[in-house]
Amino acid sequence: MFILSSTAIATEIGNPDAIGDTQFKNRLAITDVVNSVGTLADLRQWSQLQELFTEEVTIDYTSLFEGEVQNISSQQLMTQWQSLLPGFDATQHLITNHQITVNGDKATVLAYVRATHKLGDEMWVVGGYYVDELVRTDEGWKIKAIQYNALYEEGDRSLLEQAAARVAN
């Protein structure tokens, strides 16, 4: 499990003097990366999406799907997402309320997410929060780990199987 320092966040909330120019730029860049995951996935822009991740990435969706935490390549992650998301008529990932802690060349982000998946007249919606671990690279901030923490689920989960079957056919 990834841990976010609430003490570090609390000392900076609402205090512009606690955030210097470099911190502001880092926070803006990190927020862009985290938000772009949802946007690029929804737009099916796989090559651009893959660039947001380190070569190897840790993926933890166990709170939603059980199973195991995965350590996979960013290409394998794209393959997983490509085998499911295009099977929906539409998806929309809204990512908000970013709480960012930067420690040198590493950052942790807690951000809420509400993901809507539409297939025909049916929808499956999940809500929760991500805890993302990022690292600074020569190309900018990249995600090295994603942990999804489910808070609620609405609609028909079986749409996942239907969407995957549509992609497979």
Image (cartoon, rainbow, N blue to C red):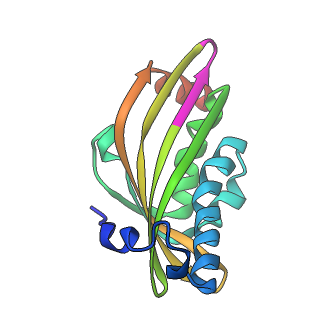
Bounds of the magenta span? Answer: 115-121
Query: Quick check: 30 above or below 43?
Result: below
Q: Nearer the viewer, residue 140 or 71?
A: 140
Quadrant in the picture for residue 142: bottom right
* Magenta-drawn stretch, dominant element (helix, strand or loop): strand
Please state if 114 lies on the left or on the right of 59 as rendered: right
Picture residue at 62% right of the left edge, 30% below the top? 87
Q: Say if 89 sits above or below 145 in the image.
A: above
Residue at figure coordinates x 54%, y 63% from the top left: 74
In magenta stretch: residue 116 = yes
- The image shows residue 49, relative to residue 153, as above or below, that is below
Is 111 placed above or below 33 here? above
Question: Looking at the rendering, in which quadrant would you find the N terminus?
Answer: bottom left
Q: Which quadrant is home to the C terminus? A: top right
Place of residue 103 in the rendered image (x, y in percent of width and height, measured from the top left): 43, 83
Q: Residue 86 location in percent, x, y?
A: 65, 35
Residue 147 included in the magenta stretch of the image: no
Residue 157 seen in the current view: no
Which image quadrant for residue 52? Answer: bottom right
Q: Could you say which is closer to the camera, residue 106 or residue 68? A: 106
Q: Position of residue 11 (x, y in %)?
A: 38, 74
